[in-house]
Amino acid sequence: MKKSCLILLLFVCVQLDAQSVFGYWYGSATVQSSGTANNYLLELVLKPEKGYVSGVFNYYFKNQFRSMLVKGNYDASGRILTLYDISIPYHKSNAGMEIECQMNFKGSLRVAKAGSNLIGLMTSLPAYKYTCTDLSFNLAFNADASKQDSVLRAIREFKEENQVWTPGKADTLTAVRVIQRKVTNYFIENQYKQREKITGQEISVGSPTISLDFYDNGEVDGDSISVFFNDQLLAFSQKLGTRSIHFDIALDSTKEVNEITMFADNLGSIPPNTALMIVTDGDKQYDIRLSSSLEKSATLRIRRKEE
């Protein structure tokens, strides 16, 4: 009898936990408009408070990553989560003109044996309804990342309400598009020759042209880099941030292996100089983490797939 009661209690606890929205969620949001295929990648970390819900909301869209604190309510009886006043860029925004949309998030918790999902809509506030289009989202629950210590740490370590790098007068643009051509900086080129190149990864691509996007890997701490392609300097003194330094690169077909090297101009306030480089090959993407110092330069080797 005691054993049966214990099993029943465990079953009830599991069921209650499965019906909770608290923890780590990830997925995507899609623009509810014909003729567009814009997607936002989303992360949501939630914890309960007295009378409300709080957490951290992250999104990645085009060349931009943002993180913000959010608050809302959870109706456990109806399994409805509502979050308020979330700032999202309009899906047709570009580097020259960015339009912000203030939206509310409303999702329904769906629980199944295969896992839990938050499914719903992000709708614009009345002042934005004629500009901003609804976003439909589907977020999956990650049980491993939803342990209490992980959730509390993620929220506790949140540092900025809006982690978009704001440049000073002497800084470069927040989103930089670099044209592929050799540039000259004698000091950096001489320093480059004196440092050891370290090959961390090698990838194979199918396209003759790829795109590269560099971001600061972690907290934005003033890291500045120069980028070399096959030992030729393409850009120097580029400050890493939460918007990308973007390159479109035509690979050299005469070479068996092409190389992208990240040269550290400095170490920022948190050594070493680290970056996330996203390599786009057609519809494929590779997330490459690079780490360079004042003695060594991280290098990615790129091979063309045989046709």
Image (tube, rainbow, N blue to C red):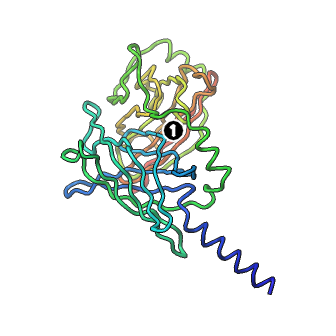
Residue 144 position in % (x across, y down): 63, 59
In the image, farthest residue toward the bottom: 1
In this view, the residue in front, 50 or 95, is 50
Q: Residue at x 61, y 34 (%)?
A: 198
In this view, the residue in front, 173 or 34, is 34
Q: Point out the image quarter for the N terminus.
A: bottom right
Q: Residues within 10 Å of mark 1 (few under 14, many from 20)?
A: some
Q: Relative to residue 141, is residue 89 drawn left or right?
A: left
Q: Point out the image quarter for the C terminus.
A: bottom left
| Residue 252 showing in the rendered view | no
Q: Which residue is the site of mark 1?
A: 276
The disc labelled 1 sits on which kind of residue? Leu
Q: Relative to residue 293, is residue 253 drawn left or right?
A: left
Residue 93 position in % (x across, y down): 26, 39
Residue 204 position in % (x across, y down): 47, 50
Q: Residue at x 62, y 21 (%)?
A: 294
- Compared to residue 147, the image places residue 66 above or below, namely above
Q: Residue at x 36, y 37 (%)?
A: 249
In this view, the residue in front, 198 or 155, is 155
**Residue 119: quarter of image:** bottom left
**Residue 97: quarter of image:** top left
In the image, farthest residue toward the right: 2
Helix, strand or loop at disc 1? strand
| Residue 64 showing in the rendered view | yes
Q: Relative to residue 15, is residue 304 drawn left or right?
A: left
Q: Relative to residue 304, is residue 197 drawn left or right?
A: right
